[in-house]
Amino acid sequence: MRVLITGRHGQVSRELQITLSQYELLVLGHEQLDMADSEAIRRQVRELRPDLIINAAAHTAVDQAESEPELAFAINATAPGVLAEEAATLGVPLIHYSTDYVFDGHKDGAYSEDDGTAPLGVYGRSKLAGEDAIRAVGGQYLILRTSWVYSLYGKNFLLTMQRLLQEREELRVVADQIGAPTWAGSIARATAELIEHWQNGHAGPWGTYHLSGLGETSWFGFANAIADQLRAQGKPCARLEPIPSSAYPTPAQRPLNSRLDCSSLQRAWNIRLPNWHDALLECLHSSR
């Protein structure tokens, strides 16, 4: 089976390239494909004629998106719609990753797929527009909303905390944003399971689902868990101080509540991610 993966160097893409290695992978990074160029996307898909498309490319620089909305919308909104159109023409499925940032974070409990969306910034608006573009095409698609993605690759909270905790004596971390850290390796494994279900004729309903680590914590709690592992290795570690979001202003506003209810995916496709803390330990002890 030929699987087209957009994005080469991103966290999820790198894990997909490991997890899906039994397939013929057609991986297109920005060197091979400009995701802001719709016609280039169409040409590549029509030339490669994959059996499955996975869109792991995205403009994920949340604060930077505020100053370059046109580029964010081109990559996060227009490109997914083009991929959906080409997938529908070929009659093949599209798997696309979205985000908790489509919500404003004002809800008390975990967000379900049916809850109203209200993104707070350009990144969230562009990702929601990408979802809408895919849904408008219809067909065989999975939109997987996830949250707080990290891995041993690229730029992310885990790697930043590991560095800062060992460089500083004290570190202030936001404690009033609640969500679930999600290891990119867990996302890749869940994607592999979804593909297997589809191949074996056991696909659930196509549509939009939530896919994040189980449980919940704050960024401060996440940082504490990372610090615990550094201390267990006998490494130097800064003192952590909890602060409110108001004490750490950023160009883009973040949702205070990023909790996602993932029960629909479990019921429909029998997919369930591990607890966020267990996944963190596995990530840290992996040899990748």
Image: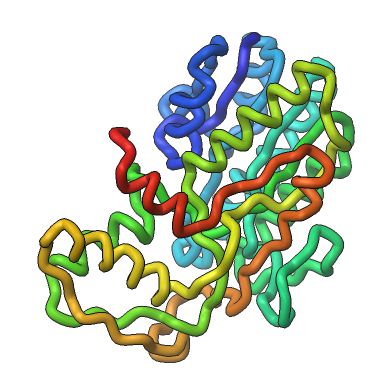
At 61% from the left edge and 28% from the top edge, which residue is drawn? 192
Q: In screen coordinates, is 112 left or right of 125?
A: right
Nearest the viewer among 285 and 77 is 285
Instruction: Answer with the quarter of the image where residue 36 lies.
Output: top right
Q: Residue at image x 55%, y 45%?
A: 58
Q: Is residue 6 above or below residue 167?
A: above
Q: Where is residue 119 in the image (x, y as percent from the top left)?
A: 69, 69
Q: Is residue 118 left or right of residue 171?
A: right
Residue 271 vs 103, above or below: the answer is above
Q: Which of 248 and 283 is in front in this view?
A: 283
Residue depicted at 66% across the width and 46% down the height: 272
Relative to 40, 208 lies left or right: right
Q: Relative to 286, say whether 103 is above or below.
A: below
Q: In this view, does 53 lie to the left or right of 34?
A: right
Where, by quadrant of the figure, is residue 169 drawn?
bottom left
Number of numbered discs on residues:
0
Q: Where is residue 8 in the image (x, y as percent from the top left)?
A: 44, 30
Compare residues 169 and 25 and report the one nearer the observer: 169
- Residue 189 placement (x, y as % from top left): 56, 34
- Give the residue displayed 78% in from the left and 17% down from the top: 200
Quadrant into which the C terminus falls: top left
Q: Point out residue 177 in the picture as x, y percentages from the top left corner.
A: 52, 78
